[in-house]
Image (spheres, rainbow, N blue to C red):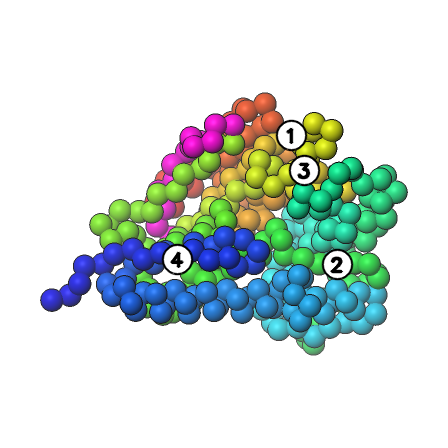
Amino acid sequence: MLQAQETVSSDTILMGSRFKITIVEQNRETAHQKINQIITEIVRIEDLISDWRAWSQVSEVNKNAGIKAVKVDREVLELTQRAIHFSKLSQGAFDISFAAMDRIWRFDDSMEQLPTAEEIRQAIQHIDYRNIIIDEKHSTIFLKNKGMKIGFGATGKGYAAYKASEYAKSLGILAGIIDASGDIQTWGKQPNGAPWSIGITNPKKRGKFLDILYFTNAAVATSGDYEKFLMIDGKRYSHIINPKTGMPSTGLTSVTVIGPNAEMCNGFSTSLMVLGKKDGLKLINQHPDYAAMMMTDSGKIIKSKHYRRVKRYLK
């Protein structure tokens, strides 16, 4: 007799964040073996793209900024191309080269005062996605100016969640969730045949939800200023930086984006946080496969034009 299917989960720290991997399997021992294989796949991605790991290809690109082009795997090249595409879509509100800002902003409780105007000016001069040169033929990336730096803090976890779900499918896993600290990719259904249910946190009322999503093959990503921030002189500063001003984004407390792909949801949520309500809605409304729910700093909830339709379609 076949064993009944059940959900098996594992929590671990990857890419500096908490990942929860949940899969549907009949055999618990086999399930844990497959989860370990999925973790190995995520570590592989981290080793490629983490700018915190000195041996990664992205770190090699950054070390050679203004010096020479660096040959990278096709996967890294294409991930960079998609990030540049987002930079263009958002007119620079999202910028893959914003990583240069990490030299002056630290969200680890070690900052006691704001960066000076001169420090911000110096960092901003290194930010411009248009100075990233891609050579498809030779699979190289070149950062034109010294001091430039690329990083995948805004799309990397979403990409890892999506790739991990695709890898899980290749292992014969018919259903599951990859939750990369809120950047979530789902596939298939729960053992009882129901879709996965995901709650959107209400930043103003913790423990409450703004909405409950029911997904089968879909993704969701949330960007917000309520979990990672600085408090200086009684004022809160978001970890999401506007690449054009060098200052934390303002106006929106959180943005949740839903759609088919976690990497895209991740990129959109960050872009919308920086763009703000008006320009953010204008951008997301141009992409009918994706939709957003925003909360303003005053607590007002705003849904993009396609929110109800996309939510229903992804169930």
| Numbered range of the magenta stretch | 204-217
Q: Secondary structure at mark 3?
A: strand
Label 3 crowd bin: few (<14), some (14–19), many (20+), radius 10 Å: many
Marks 2 and 3 sit apart, C-alpha to C-alpha, by 23 Å
Which circle's residue, 2 or 1, is located before the other in the chain? 2
Q: Secondary structure at mark 2?
A: loop
Numbered badge on residue 10: 4
Q: Position of residue 47 (x, y in %)?
A: 59, 68
Image quadrant where one finds the N terminus: bottom left
Which circle's residue, 4 or 1, is located before the other in the chain? 4
Name, please, the residue furthest toward the right. 118
Q: Position of residue 195 (x, y in %)?
A: 31, 47
Q: From the viewer's perspective, is 208 left or right of 50?
A: left
Q: Position of residue 138 (x, y in %)?
A: 69, 76
* Viewer-side label of 4, 2: 4
Q: Give whichever of 84, 53 is nearer the camera.
A: 53
Q: From the viewer's perspective, is 242 left or right of 79?
A: right
Marks 3 and 4 sit apart, C-alpha to C-alpha, by 31 Å
Q: Can residue 178 be seen here?
A: no
Which circle's residue, 3 or 1, is located before the other in the chain? 3
* Viewer-side label of 3, 1: 3
Q: Are marks 2 and 1 in contact (CB under 8 Å)?
A: no
Marks 2 and 1 sit apart, C-alpha to C-alpha, by 27 Å
User: For mark 1, what is the residue?
Assistant: 251
User: For mark 2, what is the residue?
Assistant: 149
* Location of residue 210 with respect to 134 vertically, above or below: above
* Location of residue 99 with respect to 226 vertically, above or below: below
Marks 4 and 2 sit apart, C-alpha to C-alpha, by 33 Å
Q: Are marks 4 and 2 in contact (CB under 8 Å)?
A: no
User: For mark 3, what is the residue?
Assistant: 230
